[in-house]
Image (cartoon, grey):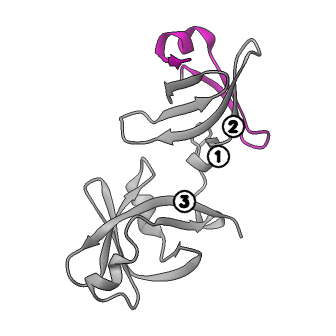
């Protein structure tokens, strides 16, 4: 069963084994739907899942002390792709974008998406080819995304306006 990274555990919180998670979504309420997570290849049931501010929090079953929670620090949190909610037409999971080839609408190939940053208001894509590119995920820039063929097509004029290019 395919697993998708939905966040990274930052650190233990409190003394009862709860951990703080940087969640990779623009809709934190989606995080609340899960009752089990995979960490280091092991599926672990959650006793409690909550969100507060920009972060998610998990209290794993049988993790009752800060020392036990410490082993999860800086670990990725995954869920089964089949458990993830269906998205609207113009929404994509980060995992669907990473590895996509990017091209300008005239067919010019630029490279491959290597990372999607979510710390800013608009997600930011980092792509590498002959050059490195950084550009925001905005509707008037992205013409189409073909998840099956791993291809993203971009508006040339808008790309030239908003992208950073590094040789």
SS of the residue under disc 2: loop
Q: Residues within 10 Å of mark 2 (few under 14, many from 20)?
A: many
Q: Which mark is residue 100?
A: 2
- Which quadrant of the view contains residue 83? bottom right
Residue 158, placed above or below residue 55: above
The one of 90 and 109 positioned closer to us in this rendering: 109
Residue 36, placed above or below residue 96: below
Give left or right: position of 116 versus 4: left
- Image coords of residue 30 (percent x, y): 45, 59
Q: Residues within 10 Å of mark 3 (few under 14, many from 20)?
A: some
Q: Residue at x 54, y 10 (%)?
A: 160
Whether label 2 touches label 1, CB < 8 Å: yes
Q: Which mark is residue 5?
A: 3
Q: CA distance from mark 3 to mark 1?
A: 11 Å
Q: Which residue is mark 1?
A: 96
- Which quadrant of the view contains residue 101? top right
- Image coords of residue 62 (percent x, y): 39, 91
Q: Where are the magenta residues, as a range?
A: 140-167
Q: How many labels were placed on the picture?
A: 3
* Quadrant occupied by the C terminus: top right
Q: Residue at x 59, y 43 (%)?
A: 92
Q: CA distance from mark 2 to mark 1?
A: 8 Å
- Image coords of residue 88 (percent x, y): 58, 44
First in sequence, mark 3 or 1: give its number.
Answer: 3
């Amino acid at each position: 069963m395919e697993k998708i990274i939905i966040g990274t555990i930052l650190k233990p919180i409190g003394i009862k084994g709860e951990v703080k998670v940087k969640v990779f979504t623009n809709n934190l309420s989606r995080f609340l739907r899960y009752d089990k997570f995979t960490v280091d290849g092991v599926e672990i049931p959650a006793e409690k899942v909550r969100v507060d501010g920009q972060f998610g929090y998990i209290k794993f079953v049988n993790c009752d002390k800060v020392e036990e929670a410490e082993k999860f620090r800086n670990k990725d949190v995954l869920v089964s792709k089949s458990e993830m909610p269906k998205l609207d037409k113009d929404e994509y999971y980060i995992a669907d974008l990473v590895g996509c080839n990017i091209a300008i609408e005239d067919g010019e190939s630029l490279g491959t998406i290597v990372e999607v940053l979510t710390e800013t208001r608009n997600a930011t894509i980092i792509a590498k080819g002959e050059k490195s590119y950084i550009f925001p995920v905005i509707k008037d820039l992205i013409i189409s995304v073909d998840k099956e063929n791993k291809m993203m097509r971009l508006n040339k004029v808008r790309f030239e306006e908003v992208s950073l290019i590094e040789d």
